[in-house]
Amino acid sequence: MSVVDHDDASAEATTVSPPLRGEDLERPFARSGPRREWLGTESEKFGVLRPNATPVSYDGRTCGIVQIFDGLMARGDWAPYREREGGPVVALSKVGGSTVISLEPGAQLELSGAPVETVHDVEAELAEHLADIAPVSETCGIDWLAVGYHPFARPEQLPWVPKERYEIMRAYFPRVGTRGLDMMRRTATVQVNLDYHDEEDAMRKLRVALKLSPIATAIFANSPFAEGRAHGWRSERAHVWLDTDRDRAGLLEALMEPGRRYRDYVAWALDVPMYFIKRGGRVVANTGQSFRDFRDRGYEGHRARYDDWLLHLNTLFPEVRLQKTLEVRSADMQSVQHLAALPAFWAGLMYDETSLAAAEALVARWSPSALVAARPLIAREALNAELCGRPVRHWAERVMALALEGLSRRGRRDEAGRDERRHLEPLAALVAAGRCPADDLLDGLDREQDPRAAILRRTRVDFDALPIRRDRV
């Protein structure tokens, strides 16, 4: 679950942002123009060096992230991003496009896709990304792992990407939870960004998505390994998030009630402690002060500006986050074969009125307290956990059916005439069998002569799984 989310370019404009006014607090969510149904997908993966699955460093002597970035920039279609002039490269942006490759704190490579119209486009974007990174990855001897928690690395083996904000967060997280540093460097997620067209639509989708988030966590559970062995949890990533930051993460129980408005999300966000602000291109640490207090009293002579509010909103990590899009953030990183299933799942539920209404009715009686109580069990048992008196598998099958029906009604077809259900059907079959991706990863592991090699083989990104352009590999 990204702790960056590409706030860098928007955190401070070339001109000084105006002072924050009361009417500005809801301004980031305001929508205008025609109704759209874009999909934006963000996915993270771990790099390891052959043959021993050693974590990739940021600036290794021979092969690290710097070398990966250099190889991509040498092609001429990727431009570097630095936090400050002369600083290290911490992201790349596609020349002439809106695709971004950035870094999580432990050098996880994150692809932030452009807004696209269909799940087919998400798959094509991923295929292009694999085609981009395949040659330089092969040259460097790097394998990429598509799983929600690093299956091998101990904390001392992982790098820290050189960003000022990460130093601030590194010092702050141990004050508010026990797993924040693991979240930063040993977790990887895939999330989907969804459109809404007005306040009522946004808050309705936020409410339904929050309630469905534990079900999605179970369906997409894909992190059963840590430090080279199975550890007993189907989603160690979800386990980590249970004790990362008690103030800014979780299910937002107060936002699950009908009738909530933008002002209710704003009220929650105002009371979350800050991390930092930016002034003159530099990060200024300000941990612990709520944004409400900063707005009212300032900090060391700095007064709240509109860009400070935007930056603060981007440092909140609930399971579903409201910004200029609705960001659904509750899934482990998936294999290449299943990655497009997440945008398909949420598009089928959120972009079809019949399925959205049915999902809304399904979750109406689920209490926030029951959902919160079920999260540890879901992190451990996934579909075998219990929620509201029934196995999670029962609810997952019903929700999956609604998503498939919604995709059918959407009717977005690829060149072969297939609709978007093709991206979700393999995972739906897994759910129907009472299994999640982690179960496939674990299947027969105890019979392997070399479990570590088996874990690597099972979690490694398969560059042959999508029809990537062979002329670029």
Image: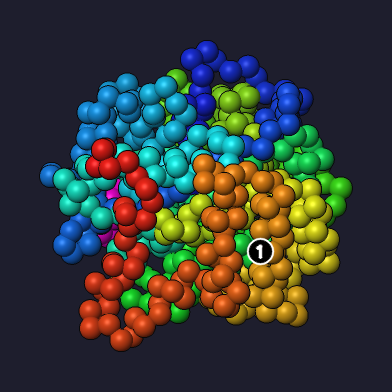
Dot 1, crowdedness within 10 Å: few (<14), some or many (≥20)?
Answer: many
Q: Amino acid at mark 1?
A: Met
Q: Residue 333 location, x and y as percent?
A: 46, 57
Q: Residue furthest bottom?
A: 447
Looking at the rendering, the stretch of residues picked out in magenta corresponds to 155-160
- Residue 118 seen in this snapshot: yes
State left or right for residue 65 relative to residue 263. Answer: left
Image coloring type: rainbow
Which residue is rendered at x = 58% and y = 41% of the image? 118
Q: Residue furthest front?
A: 416
Q: Residue 217 location, x and y as percent?
A: 58, 64
Above or below, 450 against 429 in this view is: below
Q: Residue 373 location, x and y as percent?
A: 68, 72
Q: In terms of image quadrants, where is residue 288?
A: top right
State left or right for residue 20 relative to residue 282. Answer: right
Q: Residue furthest right?
A: 259
Please tell me which residue lies in front, 231 or 122.
122
Give the SS element for disc 1: helix
Task: Give the labeled residue for mark 1.
Answer: 400
Which residue is rendered at x = 28% and y = 73% of the image? 454
Q: Residue furthest left?
A: 62
Which residue is rendered at x = 59% and y = 44% of the image? 413
Which residue is rendered at x = 18% and y = 64% of the image? 52
Q: Residue 440 location, x and y as percent?
A: 43, 74
Q: Residue 469 lies in magenta, yes or no?
A: no
